[in-house]
Amino acid sequence: MKMLWKRLSEKPTQKALGFFVVMCLVCGWVGADELAWYCRPWGSVNYRGQPAPDGLKVVAFIQEAAFDSCETKYGEYSLAIPKDDPETKEKEGWADGDLITVQVGGYTAVPSFAAFSGKQQINLYLPTLDVKLTTWGKIKGLFR
C-alpha cells in the first residue's frame, strides 16, 4: 500500500491522473450535449391488443414530414429525432412546441406527443380495424 501511495504522489502520475479526470469531464459534457440534441422517444407498441410483431416500420412525423424511422423488435421501438437548426430555412428536426406523430405499419399510433429534449418512454397504441381498405369500397357500393 505504501508503494502505491508513493507512486501516486509522484508529479508525472499526478499529471496523468489530472489529464484523465479532465478528459472524463469533457467527454461527459459532450455526451450530455449530444443527448440533449435529440428527441429520443422509445417504448412498447400495442398492436391489436398484442405486442407488435418484429419488423413493423415505425416513422416519426412533424408537420407531415418524416424525420426518423426504425422497425419494431420484441414489441418495442426506439427513435432519435434531430433538433432543428433555427438558423436555416429548412426544417431539419424538432423544435419547441412541435407535435410528433408516429405511424406504425402505415397506421397512426396514439398518443401524439410534444417534442422534448433527451430520452423519454412513450408507449404507443395502434387503434386499427380488422377491415381491409378494399372492403370499405365494397361496403360503400352497397349503399349507392
Image (cartoon, rainbow, N blue to C red):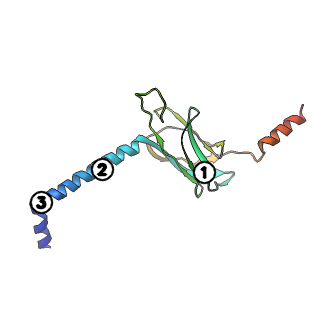
Q: Residues within 10 Å of mark 2 (few under 14, many from 20)?
A: few
Q: Position of residue 15 (x, y in %)?
A: 14, 56
Circles 2 and 3 in contact, beta carbons < 8 Å: no
Task: Name the amino acid type tagged 3.
Answer: Pro
Circles 1 and 2 in contact, beta carbons < 8 Å: no
User: Circle 1 is placed at which residue position?
Assistant: 45
User: Circle 3 is placed at which residue position?
Assistant: 12
- Up/down of 5 relative to 118, above or below: below
Q: How many marks?
A: 3
Find numbered disc 2 in the image and state the secondary structure of the residue it sits on: helix
Farthest residue to the top: give it.
Answer: 89
Query: Nearer the viewer's eye, disc 1 or disc 3?
Result: 3
Q: Position of residue 82 (x, y in %)?
A: 46, 40
* Distance of label 1 from label 3 (alpha carbons): 54 Å
Find numbered disc 3 in the image and state the secondary structure of the residue it sits on: helix
- Up/down of 65 relative to 109, above or below: above
Task: Name the amino acid type tagged 1.
Answer: Val
Query: Nearer the viewer's eye, disc 1 or disc 2?
Result: 2
In front here: 63 or 113?
63
Circles 1 and 3 in contact, beta carbons < 8 Å: no
Find numbered disc 1 in the image and state the secondary structure of the residue it sits on: strand
User: Which comes before the other along the chain, label 1 or label 3?
Assistant: 3
Picture disc at residue 27: 2
Which residue is painted at 69% across and 51% down in the image? 48
Task: Name the amino acid type tagged 2.
Answer: Cys
Q: Position of residue 21 (x, y in %)?
A: 22, 54
